[in-house]
Image (tube, rainbow, N blue to C red):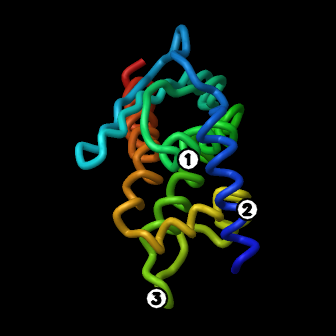
């Protein structure tokens, strides 16, 4: 447990200070904004979806290290994946963050831990309930952007 906490802290510090895929994405096909009014975290997620794959993704905004790190790691995992896999990753992350300890809830996928990889370290945030929203804010924005891309695909 101590090792997981240490790795979590390292990830948050590293990605919070130097987020990957940071900045506005030119020629995005969908985007969404997330705002946590409680602490002021705010970000915009940009996706360029082509042939049902995330061709490119980025984010812009400002907030605490947990939010910035969550967005950075999320977007690292999304580059080049199918929209179906992006939704599965999203479902796994949200399940992990909202699942009650020792609950008998069924995971949305048998391979959630494998899908999430280093994102599983964000489970450490659950020890601080007021910070869960910081970790999930980028994922909420991703959900809205993916939903928007689905709407675009069905109207074309």
N-term-proximal mark, 1 vs 3: 1
Q: Which residue is mark 2?
A: 7
Q: Is 99 placed left or right of 108 in the picture?
A: left
Label 1, secondary structure: give it.
helix
Q: Label 1, on which residue? A: 70
Looking at the image, residue 43 sits to the left or right of residue 39; the answer is right
Splitting the image into 4 quarters, where does residue 118 fall?
A: bottom right
Residue lying farthest to the top in this orientation:
27
Q: Which is nearer the eye, 154 or 4?
A: 4
Which labelled disc corresponds to residue 104?
none
User: What residue did someone put label 3 on?
Assistant: 103
Q: Quadrant of the N terminus?
A: bottom right
Question: Most extreme residue toward the left, as rendered?
Answer: 37
**Residue 40 in the image: x percent, y percent?**
30, 39
Q: Residue at x 43, y 69 (%)?
A: 128
Q: On the rendered structure, is 81 left or right of 91? A: right
Residue drawn at x 66%, y 69% as measured from the top left:
5
- Relative to residue 104, is residue 53 depicted above or below? above
Quadrant assignment for the C terminus: top left
* Mark 2 or 3, closer to the camera: 2
Mark 1 or mark 2: which is in front? Answer: 2
Q: Is residue 126 left or right of residue 4?
A: left
Q: Looking at the picture, how far across and down is residue 119, in whole percent?
A: 65, 57
Find numbered disc 2 in the image and state the secondary structure of the residue it sits on: helix
Q: Which of the 4 image quarters holds residue 19?
A: top right
Q: Position of residue 82 (x, y in %)?
A: 65, 38
Q: Nearer the viewer, residue 10 or 136?
A: 10
- Give how far apart the Cα atoms at labels 1 and 2 are: 14 Å
What element does badge 3 sit on?
A: loop
């Amino acid at each position: 447990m101590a090792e997981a906490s240490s790795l979590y802290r390292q990830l948050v510090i590293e990605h919070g200070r130097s987020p990957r895929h940071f900045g506005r994405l030119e020629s995005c096909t969908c985007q969404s904004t997330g705002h946590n009014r409680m602490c002021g975290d705010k970000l915009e997620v940009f996706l360029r979806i082509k042939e049902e794959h995330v061709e490119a993704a980025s984010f812009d905004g400002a907030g605490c290290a947990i939010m910035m790190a969550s967005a950075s790691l999320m977007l690292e995992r999304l580059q080049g994946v199918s929209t179906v896999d992006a939704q599965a990753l999203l479902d796994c992350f949200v399940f992990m963050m909202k699942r009650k300890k020792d609950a008998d809830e069924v995971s949305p996928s048998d391979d959630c831990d494998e899908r999430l990889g280093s994102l599983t370290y964000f489970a450490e945030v659950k020890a601080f309930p007021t910070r869960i929203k910081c970790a999930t804010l980028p994922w909420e924005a991703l959900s809205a952007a993916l939903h928007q891309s689905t709407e675009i695909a069905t109207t074309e």
